[in-house]
Amino acid sequence: MYDITRRESFNHLSRWLEEARQNGNPSMTVMLIGNKTDLEHRRAVSTKEGEIFAQENGLVFMETSAKTASNVENAFIKTAESIYEKIKEGLYDPSREGNGVKLGVMANGGANTAKVGGSGGPAKTGGCC
């Protein structure tokens, strides 16, 4: 995540991304979020710059405002969709605990569904994540 009103937060993305990739699963889903769209009048990083960085680095991209909740839910949905596609492609194996995706059981007794995170806590019910 970077602050669209602070150029230096955007300038640090390459280093942060490199650290994440060194310490994480090589096929992990990474989302780049430009935050504080409610401060459009103070924008220092264009949407296009964020899109280009995301595209060049294979990231899911979106701009949000945590203050107004604009696009916050969509950011989680886009990330979950990307993870689900990787499960379908066989890049993630939900039966293997070490990859950050776990199988859970729906409250209504339905089939196992993917759970994103791997924190060991209870699975959320009623959906995929």
Image (cartoon, helix red, strand yellow):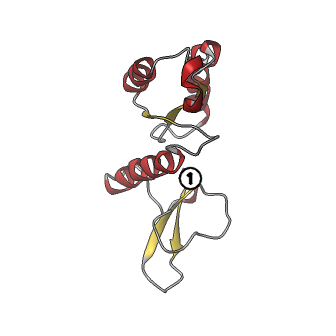
* Image position, residue 117 (x, y; %): 59, 55
* Image position, residue 21 (x, y; %): 55, 31
**Which image quarter holds the N terminus?**
top right
Outermost residue toward the front? Answer: 41
Question: Residue at the location (56% across, 14% down)?
Answer: 44
Question: Residue at the location (56% across, 20% down)?
Answer: 41
* Image position, residue 50 (x, y; %): 45, 22
Q: Write down the residue under mark 1.
A: 100
Outermost residue toward the bottom? Answer: 109
Question: Residue at the location (44% across, 33% down)?
Answer: 61
Number of marks? 1
**How crowded is the residue under tag 1: few (<14 C-alpha within 10 Å), some, or many (20+)?**
some
In this rendering, would 97 be left or right of 53? right
Can I make out residue 35 in this image?
Answer: no
Q: Amino acid at mark 1?
A: Gly
Question: Residue at the location (53% across, 71% down)?
Answer: 104
- Of the pair 86 and 60, the residue shown nearer to us: 60
Residue 28 sits above or below residue 76 on the image: above
In this rendering, would 19 be left or right of 113? right
Q: Quadrant of residue 39?
A: top right
Can I make out residue 63 in this image?
Answer: yes
Helix, strand or loop at disc 1?
loop
